Structures are given as structure tokens and as C-alpha cells.
Amino acid sequence: MENALNLDTVKLAENKKEIVILDQTLLPNECKYLSISKAGDIWEAIYSLRVRGAPAIGVTGAYAYYVLADQIETEDKDKFVKECTEMMEYINSSRPTAVNLSWALNRMHNVMLTEKDHMNIPDLKVRLMKEADAIREEDIQISRNIGTYGFELLEKLGKGVGIMTHCNAGTLATAKYGTALAPMYIALEHGWDPKKDLHVYCDETRPLLQGARLSAYEMQAAGIDTYVQCDNMASYTMKGGKVGIVFVGCDRVAANGDFANKIGTSGVAIIAKHYGVPFYVCAPSSTIDMTLESGDEIHIEQRKAEEVTEMWYKERMAPEGVGVVNPAFDVTDHSLVTGIITEKGIAYEPFKESFEKMGIKPVEK
Ligand code: MRU
């Protein structure tokens, strides 16, 4: 089983014309890379969760901007700007909840708008490629920093700690290391024994099983003592005293600390509060959306019914015609959050002031 740290979630192909993604819909059974360069294929890869996780879709958005801009054949700058704008809006429509996608696309777009007046189009395309590479490199460093802050919390709890996580916020969800799983990778770098010092409980994460397929795969491949549990088993495990801390990722954090993450996260937070288990959100500062006062303003993606009624089984597993609820994310109230771990430090209540002290400002979306 390949250590996930050795896999590239998303990168630019050597020919600089395609994006290479690891198709996460096939994991853990098959490790297959896809090379994509058409707008429709990139949109589909993001929508279908072939590449997923907030930071990873941000990096994909950045490369999508470069690869698609590179295909625009014109010397006319107005035409170039118009086509880039249309392409950016189309890619951005693939998934609405994670702020990282629009954040990365906007960062690329702003570079294009700022540089276009003193560069010719071929040079501008090279500049865009460098910006996308920079976004990927920064993501790796951000994840490492989050992992280091998270590891300090693990050290305080001591070796042998049980960690619960929901969905996948691991290396597969970022350019490398992940956010919620990064503390465990850093612990291994510090010589912690993967079998004795860390015990990771992965919620399976219905309906698309990112916890069972991806987090459990990552942690097990790293040699860590790993358990998969159905989503409705979190209370049992926490009540049994096996869990010292919860680490989850996030797709968008509002200024007051409310945050959206994979559906089911808020339930885990409520259970953690009940049993007094510290609950930490791992959030690159690009995920903090200071323009939103509270989580009520976060747009929750609704996905197709078949993910609930048919996926993963050869036969339908719910009656024909039954109504289906399938929100991809939910919002957890900030009152349930112990702290929000960013690459700049750990934010505590009142979160808005804590973010401001860290220099986190409203981002363009
Ligand atoms: O629908 P997904 O698989 O993209 O959802 C992913 C999550 O909810 C992650 O926890 C979040 O994006 C953070 S990834 C570092």
C-alpha cells in the first residue's frame, strides 16, 4: 500500500499543457492518474470528486486557469480577458461550498488583469503558470504549518492519544500533508510510534465514504493504528474514552468561527462537546471567509439523490421514488469549536478578533 505522501493529488503535466490528477473515486482499490486539459473534463473531475478537498480543488482551479488560458489563441488582449473571465466562471460553477476554488481562480484572474498591460500574451501565460505553481507550493507549506500546530496539541495530550476525524482532510485533499491529518504525519516525523502512540478513528462519511476510502487508506498506509467506524458510531467511541481530540478540515469558515465541512461534521462536534472532547478545525487562512458574518450565509452544495440511493452497491438500496436529502456539507456552530488551527497559529473565541490579530483579511471571491 503506497504511502499517500508519495502520491501527487494534483500537478501540472511535464508538457505544461495538462493537469494530472489522482482519480480519488477509484481509491483505495486503484491508483490511477488522469491527464485532463479540456474545460468540460476539468469541471467534471471537480464535480465528480475525482479531485476533492477544499485546498486540492483550489490548486486544481489555479492550474485549470493556466491550462485553459494557455489554449486561448489570440493577440487581442480584450478577447483574452473576456475568454479568461468566461472560463473562470465556468470552472467556479463546479462546486460552490469550498471558498478555495473561487479564491484560487480570483487570485489567478487578478494576476492576469494586473500584468496584462505590460506583458505580451505568451509572457502572460508563463506568468500564470508560475502563479499556479506558487499556489501549489504555498499549500504544501500551509499544510505543514497546520500539522505542526496540531502536533503541539497531540504532544500535550501525550503519546497513545486517540484522534477522531471525519471525511478526508489528508494529503489527498491538499497538495501534500493535508490539514486534519497533517498532525499525525508530523508526529511520525518526530519519531512517534505509529502503532502505539497514535490511534486514529475515521468516520466512514456517508454517502461518498471519503473517511473509509481515503482517510483510513492514508492513515493505514502510513502504518498508523487505524479504525473505520460508521458515522453513527462516533458517540460510542467517544463515550468509551478512546478519543482525546477531534481534528476535522473545513470548506469555509465564517468570521464568527462557524464553519462548513463535510456533512455529519456538526453531529461529531455536538457529541464531542457532550463528552468534553476537544474539537479542533484545521483551516488554511484562505478558507476563512471574513466577508461572511456567520455560517448561515454559507451556500451548501446539494448533490444528486443517486449518491444516497445507489452508490457503492450493485443494486438500488432504497425504495424507488423515496425522497432524498443529500447536502454535501453542514455548518457547525462556533460554540462547539475548541480552536481553529491555521498556518498562522491557533484561533480561539472570539474567533473574529483572533483572525484579525493573525492578519486574516476578507479575500476576493
Ligand atoms: O466533498 P469533499 O470530499 O470535497 O469534502 C471534503 C471535506 O469536507 C474536507 O474536510 C474539506 O474540504 C477540507 S480538506 C483539507
Image (tube, rainbow, N blue to C red):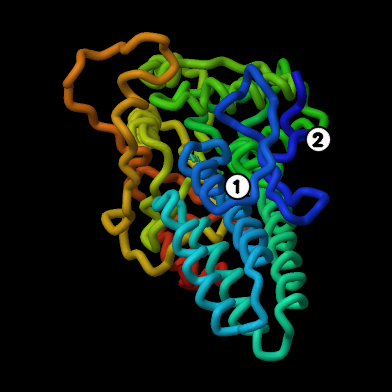
Residue shown at the point (29%, 33%) measured from the top left: 326
Q: Is residue 19 left or right of residue 54?
A: right
* 266 vs 37, nearest the viewer: 37
Q: Is residue 293 visible?
A: yes
**Residue 190 bears which disc, if any?**
2
Crowd tier of the residue under label 1, counting other residues whose Cα lies within 10 Å: few below 14, some 14–19, many 20 or above:
many
Measured as percent of width and height from the top left, residue 294 is found at: 31, 59
Amino acid under label 2?
His
Residue 56, labelled with which disc?
1
Q: Secondary structure at mark 2?
A: loop
Q: Is mark 1 within 8 Å of ligand 1?
A: yes
Measuring from the top left, give residue 338's x and y in whole percent.
45, 45
List the single residue furthest toward the bottom. 118
Q: Quadrant of the N terminus?
A: top right
Q: CA distance from mark 2 to mark 1?
A: 26 Å
In-image side of 333 versus 319 (left or right): right
Q: Does the image show residue 183?
A: no
Lower position in the chain sequence, tag 2 or tag 1 = 1
Identify which residue is drawn at 36% across, 26% down.
307
- At a point 34% along the width and 37% down the height, the residue shown is 303
Instruction: Looking at the picture, tell me which residue is in the foreground, 169 or 342.
Output: 169
Q: Are marks 2 and 1 in contact (CB under 8 Å)?
A: no
In the displayed structure, 318 sits above or below 287; it is: above
Name the residue at 39% across, 16% down.
233
